[in-house]
Amino acid sequence: MKSKIIYMVLVLATLWAAAAGRGEFAFFLLVFELLFAVCMAAGVWYVAGKLRVSAKTESSAVTRGEREKFILEIENSTVFPVGDIQIVMDVTGAGRIIRHTAADRKSRDSWQIFLEPVHCGFFRVGVTELRVFDYLGLFSAKIRIPSLARTIAVIPRIHLMDEETVQGFYGEEEDNENAARAGTDSQEIFDTRYYHQGDMLKNIHWKLSAKEDELLVKEFSMPAGRMVSVYLDTSDGTEEQTTPDQLDEFLDLAASLGNALVEKEQLFEYVWMEKGTKEALHFEVNGREAFYQALECIPGICQGISDNVLVPEHGGVRITMDGRIQRYFPEGEGRL
Amino acid sequence: MRKKQTQKEQNNMEVLILDSGYVPQSQKKQTEKGGMLLSFLVLFGAVGVLAGSLVSAFSIRDERLWLLIPGIFLFSLFFSWFYADRRLDSRRIYGFLAIVILYMAVCFVLQNRITAGFYQTADFVMSRINQVYHGNMRLYGAYESGDMVIFWLPVLFPVTGLLGAGIVRRRNWLLILSILFPLVALMMIAGGRPGNLWMYFLAMSILLLFTAGRSYFCGWKAGLTALLAAVVVSVPSWCISMPLAGVEIPAIQRGTTRIQNRLLQSLWSFLPKISGGNLQLSLEGIAGGVDNGELGTTDGVFFTGVDALKVTSVQRPSETVYLRGYIGETYTGNSFEPGAEENFQNAAAVWKTDGDSTIYIQNLPFLRTMYYEKQSSGKNAGESESAVNQITVENLNANPEYTYVPYDAFLNDVYQISNGDGAVCGQSRQEDIFSCYWRSNAKEILESYRDGKDTSGVLNDTEKSYRNFCSTYDLQIPEKGLERLKKECAEAKEENHWGESETGAEMPDWAVADEYEEIRKYVVKRLLRDCSYETDTDKLKDGQDFVETFLYDTKEGYSMHFAAAATMMFRMFGVPARYVVGYVAPQELFSENADQTYTAVLEDDNAHTWVEIYQPFLGWTPVEVTPGMETEFVDQTEEKEQSDRVPEEAKTETEEEEISVSGFAVRIAGWFTGHLADILKLCAVLCLLMLVLGSGIKIRAAHRARYGVGEDPAEAVRAIYRYICRILYKKGMSKDCTAADGGTIRFIRDFCPVFTEEDGNRLQKLILRASYGNEPVTEEERLWMRQLCRQIKRSVRGKKR
């Protein structure tokens, strides 16, 4: 608008000079200014119709704190170089961004922007408007664009976990191969616990029960190859109290544990609740690829703390908001 | 890495926007040398066009001026290399200082020739100003060939350097326009008018630089494409505009002339002040003051607040003082030309004049009045002393071409009269002291001896001879033209029987005087009845007759119109009349001084035009025909009738005249023009203060942003890290390097040997902690980061990977 006003003032001043009889050149300049403006308007309208735009990102997920590149490819099939293309983008967490670029004649140039998400979750980056300006900046025309939005998952960072911490979830400390874990392998007693209604009678440890004068049930160790459930329990957090950094730490822990389990070739599944879902979500991880796919899913937790409480169905590992990792037993107390 | 402020979304997502940029298709990247060549050509073209426009604008001629072309070529080449060569990136400031020192040394060595060249150029400029604005600036008269080139080259060198900074180094159209615009504006203000082709080249250069500067391309593609489009559009523009070139809109023309005059008046008032009196424009060149007999070339705009003459009278003025300047005799249709000196000299050869006949004729009224006054005082012994007054006229800023002389004054031999009995030429003295009689006194004295007395004597004989001379040459009417006025005057003359003696014999002087009085009344009535006072009039078109246009077409004008029309009408009725331009000092303008003299300071708007008629025995007498001015020669009844007849018009015209001459807007304009120098000084000081303040604020803000001053330690560390990255990018670090992967650390270690591995680890951890960690950053760590930044800056200075 500013450039239009300035140009208008210029035309009026030239008109004044011409009408006041200040020479032939004033007349020429007046006619030239008007014709040139018309030429610019026509040119920008023509070029806007000929530009083709596409967008892409390097990947669909990016690690928290690392850069993601969003690339806009502009194909100009005309003979006129375009000096000013305004790009209006919408980026979740950053708002509306306006940038400018150019496009050479008969070429396929690109424009890129680096984005760095700070917290885990999902963010959407999309181009809402592309506008071509003429050489003087007077006129502009919109470029027709397809949907140029991309959703990118921000996955948590993976840290190396202590061998001791991880080992505690597999079995006895001295035996990394057969880390103790609760299960149904009757060949090996893992532990004992008090009787709950529903326990099988054959699992009652009669000798110890007689001694303790209380019914005790045998807990058997997990045979190798059994899946571990990793519960991502956000129930002790609330919408108001939970900060993004806390969620990041939480997910970092989950990712780090998952990475450790994958390295141990341990099958596991992530179980978590998301805001708006009534049932827990499961994602089974049976390899590295599935692990990364899981990492792209669990940031759904960042969309909000669920109102429903995660109720683990069977034993596993529970990660809580305060950063603790515990072996989890559905009822009663378990001993680590 | 450039970070921007972010906004948090409802899902607490926060995304930092880092660098973005245009990436051209790889095979189409412009080579560096190609870019430099284009920049050089653009710079050479821009400076060449600017120099060519200036030379053309002031018609500067010199046989060695062609040397400017290779000079500009070399300068452009030098500055293109100076700004584009990356090897000079960190040394450019030293190069710049060296250039400045060398430049000053060259100027010092060649100072005499540069000064001579300056004067030569100034002569061309000033003669142009004199030509356009009718100025009277004295030229320096320096004509040695070759010096002008030696002046121009040192001037063009820094201009090329400045333009190069905006063209080669960084395409900055604002910087370029800030250099070009003042030069072009000054050129136009000084009256310079480059040829159409040069103006076209200038416009195209500005278009190229502007479009290239605002494009997001690295090279000149956008600018050159716009230029090509402009050249193509120029052809139909030229074809369309040529037929329109002759069209003028008078209202706009008038308004433009008034605005231009006001601007020039402002220029007039402060040019002498800033130049110590060396630069002066004459008033008449800027639509004011006493000029010549040209009719209808300017509007009725006069200066306000500009003192033209200072008039001091020994006696208290009892009438309006008319000071004659230019006297026009021959009417040509659009001007009153002075009389031919040859005619006067031929006639005066047989007159009984004592000494210089031109001075004698000028002094005739005074001498005759004094003679008759002495005769009267001799008869009436003991009567009052002589009525001779003394008037001093001091020329402050009026046109020095004339001496402004009151009626019935005595001139001594130092004065020169132009064209025989025309205007008194200007003197080098600023003050002229005249002995003179008040017109009313002179009239009274002479009239008492006119009728029936013995009017023989040398003085009277000379007066009769001169009267006959005036009746021959001051009754001239153009043979062609003024047909309507001739018919009207002939009818009025016949109706009133003017010029017909009842007895058929020559009429006595008193009868002639009575007839002249009747004619005067008729002329004044005729003009007042049909014409109105207006200062805003159209310029006279080619082929138009000034008087006829005024009397029968426009019917509006100011003193120039009324006086010209009255002169022709008087002549057509047989009354010798002349057109006079000078100054008028109404008696109300005089104020008493401590020494009991009376002084009036006449401003430019006291300049006036009137008609003078030759009354037999009395001599030349001014006649006022402009509405609103004092009409001394109208008797009381006549004056009353006049004001009764057209009371509203006269009063309205008087009011309008007052408003038009000293209206509110004009007063405001006058105040501004009077104080323009002070206003400009104040503006300059304010601008300087704002510049200094703005620069200080900007520098401080940049410093704070660079080091995170005022932020918490973590943010400060991030800010310092971003600054370090910017420094390293300039040294060639890839933008993909990050602290997390250690790329930045490795790059720093390459440049900074004192940067140990331990420092590198510490830096990496600190940055990661400041960016993502939960533990706070301490003040010591912030200080350490700052020291590290300084260390890195010192180390990378002058180095490149």
Image: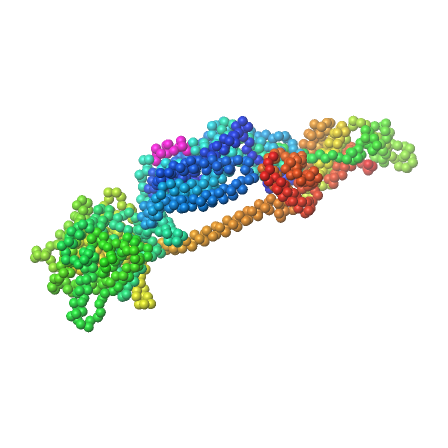
**In this view, B576 is above or below B223:** below
Q: Residue at x 22, y 69 (%)?
A: B385
Q: Is residue B432 left or right of residue B231?
A: left
**In this view, B375 is above or below B265:** below
Q: Nearer the viewer, residue B446 or B379?
A: B379
Q: How many marks?
A: 0
Q: Nearer the viewer, residue B514 or B220?
A: B220
In the picture, the quarter occupied by the N terminus of chain B is: top right
What is the chief secondary structure element of the magenta stretch? helix
User: From this viewpoint, is residue B761 visible?
Assistant: no
**What percent of the width, then of the height, locates residue B581?**
26, 53
Picture quadrant where residue B373 is located: bottom left
**In this view, A18 is above or below B27:** below
Q: Residue at x 75, y 31 (%)?
A: A261
**What percent of the width, then of the height, locates residue A192?**
86, 34
Q: Is residue A5 left or right of residue A213?
A: left
Q: Residue at x 31, y 41 (%)?
A: B248
**What percent of the width, then of the height, locates residue B558?**
27, 52
**Is B296 one of the magenta-colored residues?**
no
**In this view, B794 is above or below B469:** above
Picture quadrant where residue B207 is located: top left
Q: Nearer the viewer, residue B566 or B782?
A: B782
Q: Residue at x 26, y 60 (%)?
A: B321
**What percent of the width, then of the height, locates residue B717?**
65, 43
Magenta region: which residues? B229-241
User: From this viewpoint, is residue B737 visible?
Assistant: yes
**Is B234 one of the magenta-colored residues?**
yes
